Each structure stands twice: as structure tokens, then as C-alpha cells.
Image: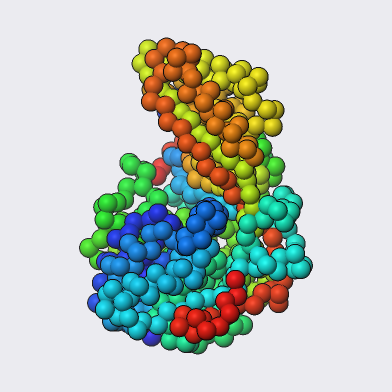
Amino acid sequence: MTFLIGSGAGFSGDRTDAAIPVVAELIRRGLPSALVFETLGERTLAAAHRAMRDAPDAGYEPLMDELLAPVLRDCLDHGIAILGNFGAANPAGACELVRRLAARVGRPAARIGRVHGDDIRARLADLDLAPWEAETRALPGDEDLISANVYLGAAPLVQALELDAEVVVTGRVADPALFLAPLVHHFGWAWDDWDRLAAGMMAGHLGECGAQVSGGYFADPGVKDVPGLATLGYPIIEVESDGRLVVTKPPGTGGCVTVRTVKEQLLYEVHDPVNYLTPDVVVDLSQVGVRQLGPDRVEIGGIKGKPAPERLKTTVCYEGGWQGEAEISYAGPNALARARLASDVLRERLTFRAPPELRQRLDIIGHASVFDDDDGALQRRMTAAADGDYRLRLAVEHAERGWVERATQELLALYCAGPAGGGGVRRHFQRRVFTASYLVKRTDVEAFATLIEESCHAPIAS
Amino acid sequence: MRPSPADAAIDAKTVPLHRLAHARAGDKGDRLNLALFAYSPEHYETLLRHVTEERVLALFAHRGASRVRRYPMPGLGGMNLVIDDVLQGGVNGALNLDGHGKTLSFLLLGMTVTVEDAEPQR
């Protein structure tokens, strides 16, 4: 029988009303189903650890309340399991929030499962670590290390579902594992049934970014038009016991599911498509094909699987000093020349007003910014309209906040000491958390699940 | 760097990839992947011929790209391009406004290619 998995969020900061039509459709279809909130990226995990360092009660998804409140009661009433990595750096805090929310919607006895084992900070020094293939940075010293989290696979999430958890809270797990877990639990797939596990992982890969498979992050007006972006429907993935997949979305919502939207998401963040590494299976996409079955219904076939890798990826967060940004606008006649002069003045000022190790970058937004490198190679060789609306941006980084403040203050000083007509200065500073990726032996990782009332009496492995 | 519509007018057979293909960027650390798909099957060969590892490396050289690997995906009418060290620190280390490099799919789509039949289509 078909199992349905809906997506309620594809990143931290996503629309918080997305799950409502998804859950309504899951209920209407009356099939066994689950709802997944994926809210944890490399950036978000680092931000969560930064937040928890400043306030020990923080460190889980800040939008959890808004994401869960509209659908929690309906999911509990209809047996739709909710799985989310919204625990981020602090799954215990996230579980407590779910418990309070469940009580608020009249279901104080809701069963909440927590996945443990991703946090290996305390054991990091004793583990056999290998750098991830594209990692060039050395492991930070103890004094700079903030956190180390393994990308867990689906097994501990399946364990939580076997404990009859109605809501499963995780920290760092592989995003698609959130989708694979209810499939393994429902269909009873074996852990060496590589083709089915691969199909389940790709169901997750297609759904994990929310609307990115149903018309979000796709529209290019006049080229790739998408209807109803303001009411975009988040995906529902239909999975059969043999691993057949169909991507669809709730009727009456905006967006579109087409072979093109599905193809873009299939390869999103994939490197070698023949060896797409996940904790539970190595996926081979070389034979994959997509087919439009009808409006907003696309079938994916030909997904193959190979045995899971011996090592699991681990994200290490460490102290990154301070970053500061400051901007000022120049508009109207000769604006580009005034913005360039301001940029040159800042560069010169920083040579004698800041230490040489201060890292800096100057963009002229509207002329060259995001495509450029830190040294401004594109800015120098590109041409742009002399008159226009340009915004000069300075970004700096240093271990000490004081130097970041002083450097950005040099941009502020352009108000009186820079070119004519500059306005609209904004500046801000933030602590940086750098990340690096390593591989640990899977046999060194001890992952498991508990229900939260049980975990109150057991030591928490974090 | 980014071609204007006037660039296409210089030679009717030379068009930006944007006319033939769509793309999406994804990141892991300091590594970027660009998935590129032809709108119509006959342009898949055009992509294979012109969007080479060498040209893509040259396009991103100013950002410190060190290596490009291309994975053709005939079943999808497209390819996956994996570019190392192009994000100048990646999402948690870059000073770039776009540390993810999400906008870079459109830097790729600005690359010009030659279409043999001179009939670019969507």
C-alpha cells in the first residue's frame, strides 16, 4: 500500500504555514503517512551552537512553535507521525517545547521520541577521524572547538517510531533519513535492501528542501514560469513498497511539479551521481529517469543502491572570531564613480587604520557583488552605467570584535569624510562559527532513541 | 562577464546557456555543484560539446576554483558540475553576501555557447 510523506519545511526560516495544506491532503487521502520538517543546514547548525553558547536554553529551531502549532493536533489525531531535525544543537530543549505545545493543543500524553548519538563533542579527541574529501582545514584545537555532530542515518529514527513516538525530534541526521525512517518502519525494508533504501533516501532528497521540488526556487519569468508562488504547495511523496516514487503536491495550492522541477532537485547538492553518499546507502543515479504522469504528478524510476559507507560525515563547529558588515548607498548622476571612490578611500584607510590580518571585501551592489571574489576581480573588469543606484558594502573578519567595529566605523565616517551624497548606512557585527567536515567510523557512533519521559530518568548522551 | 542580450546579436549562433538550459546550485562546505539541464533533448549534445570542465574552471577561476568535475546525465538530458574551492570559505566562512553560492547557477547560465542549427529554443 502507498505510504505518503509530506514536507512541512525545507530549511530554517521557511514558510511556517506550508504544512497546513499538506496535512489536510494527507488526512483527505486517508493513507498511512508522515510529515517531515527539515530545518537544519550547515549554516543553521553553526547558528544553533552559537545561540546555545550565548543562552543554554536556546539552540533548537527558533520557529518550531510556529511550524508545529497549526498542524500538531491534526497529526496526532490522524496518526501522522511528525519527524524533524528541529532539535539542532539542543534536542532536549526542542522535546520540551513539543511537550508544552502538545499540552496546549489538548494532547498532554503525546509520545515524543528523541534521537541521541549525533553529538560526539566529548569523544572527538579519542576517535579515528579522516578529513572529508573536500575539506582542506585542519581540525581546530580544543580551545576553539564548539561542537561535533555526526550525520546519523535512519536507524535511530526507526527505533523511535518502534517506541510508538508520535513526534520524533533529532539533532544532526542526514536530511533524507527523516523521510527514509517512516518508510523502513512502515514497509519493514531490510537494512541491506539497497535499491529500496536508495529509493527511500531519494524520496527524502526530493522532499527535504520543501518547495524546491514543487516549483519553489525555480521560477525565471518568461523562461520557467510558476503559477501561484505566494500559495506554493509543499511536496507530498508517494512511495510504494517496491520503492516506486511519485512526487505531487496538495490540490488547490500554487506551484507546479514537473519533470524540470524534479530534475533540478534530483541533483541538488549531489556530487558524483553514481556514488551519492548517505549514511544508510550509497545511491546510484546513473540510470534514473523522470516521467510526467499527469498534472503535478512526476514518477522517478531507476534508482539503484549500493552498500552504505564505512564512515559517517561529521560537522565540527569552532570559533571563527567576528564578522562585521557595513553598507552605504550612492544614487543618481555619476553614482558609480562616487561608489568606487568611496571603496578606494576605504581600502586606503584600512591599510593604515587596521592590522594586516584583517580580512576584508568590498562590493558595489548593483555593479558587481555576489559573482565576484574577495579581491574584486570582476569589479575591475566589468563596465556598468555611470548613473544608477549603487550600494557599497564592506565585510570584514577578525578574531577581535574591536578591530571589526573600528573597520566598519571607517565606512560610517564616509558620511562626512567621503564622496558626495552617500546615505543609508547600516552596520552590524556577529560572532562567527566556522565549520569543517570529517569522517568517523560508523562503528564508533552510538545512536539510539528514547521517549522523553524515559530520558528524564536516564543519562542523556550529550 | 555576464553577457547582455546584445552579445547574442553579434552572432546569431552564439547564445547564452540561459536560452538553452536551466540550472540549480547546491553547496557542501567550499564545494559547489551546478546541475544543468537542456530544455530540449537536441541541445543536450550542445551542452556536452561546449560546457566542458576547462571552460567552467575558467569561468570560476577568479574565485579560486581549483578543480571541476563533470558528470553527464543522459537520462536527465543534463549534467552535474562539481567545482572545488569556489566559495571562498563556504556558507560559514565566506565574506561574500552569498556564501552558499546559490546565485552562481546564473553565472554559469551567462556562459555563451555555439548552437550549430542556429535555432535556440526553450
Viewer-proximal residue among B114 and A31:
A31
Q: Position of residue A91 (x, y in %)?
A: 50, 69
Kindly indicate the quadrant of the structure image that contains residue A32.
bottom left
The colour scheme used to paint the residues is: rainbow
Indicate left or right for A393 with A67 as reference: right
Viewer-proximal residue among A213 and A181:
A181
Task: Tell me the quadrant of the picture where the N terminus of chain A can be found.
Answer: bottom left
Residue shown at 49% from the left, 85% from the top: A454
Residue shown at 45% from the left, 83% from the top: A453
Q: Position of residue A70 (x, y in %)?
A: 28, 67
Indicate left or right for A350 with A11 as reference: right
Give the farthest residue toward the left.
Answer: A252
Q: Position of residue A353 (x, y in %)?
A: 63, 22
Q: Position of residue A172 (x, y in %)?
A: 55, 66
Q: Is residue B62 visible?
A: no
Residue shown at 34% from the left, 67% from the top: A68
Task: Tell me the quadrant of the picture where the C terminus of chain A can be found.
Answer: bottom right
Query: Is residue A349 placed above or below B103 in the rendered structure?
Result: above
Viewer-proximal residue among A367 and A206:
A367
- Count of marks placed on residues: 0
Indicate left or right for A353 with A21 as reference: right
Query: Is residue A14 placed above or below A276 in the rendered structure?
Result: above
Q: Is residue A96 visible?
A: yes
Query: Is residue A10 placed above or below B42 in the rendered structure?
Result: below
